[in-house]
Amino acid sequence: MKYNLLGNTGVLVSEIGLGMMTFGGGAKWGIFGGLDERDAGLLVDQAMDAGVNFFDTANVYSDGQSEEILGKTLKNKLLSCYL
């Protein structure tokens, strides 16, 4: 995976990012996709294993569900590293 500096922050971000618009669903967002928490978690795990550390999300994607799913997935992944 290639990484680039994020401005002058010193933070390296992957050149490839994972978009979260399909995480969650609901009436108006179901047209774009509707990955549930389990499937979204598997996708995030695969991306992170490949070196992705840049995730594109917004609080409007699935009315905030995408951010909640990403947060839970990252929390579970981090906790599993320490158990």
Image: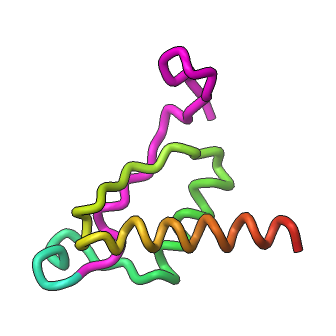
Which residue is painted at 55% across and 35% down in the image? 14
Q: Which of the colour schemes (rainbow, by chain, secondary structure, one colour) is used?
A: rainbow
Extreme residue in the left direction: 28
Residue 3 is inside the magenta segment: yes
Residue located at (48% from left, 18% from top): 7
Q: Quadrant of residue 53?
A: top right
Extreme residue in the right direction: 83
Name the quarter where the C terminus is drawn.
Answer: bottom right
Q: Position of residue 57 (x, y in %)?
A: 36, 55
Q: Nearer the viewer, residue 75 or 27?
A: 75
| Image-quadrant location for residue 59 | bottom left
The answer to whether residue 26 is above or below residue 68 is below
Answer left or right for 44 relative to 83.
left
Magenta-highlighted residues? 1-25
Check the picture and name the quadrant holding the N terminus.
top right
Residue 27 falls inside the magenta stretch? no
Residue drawn at x 68%, y 55% is 49
Residue 55 drawn above or below residue 35? above
In the visual, does 26 lie left or right of 14?
A: left
Q: Quadrant of residue 4?
A: top right
29 or 32, which is in the foreground? Answer: 29
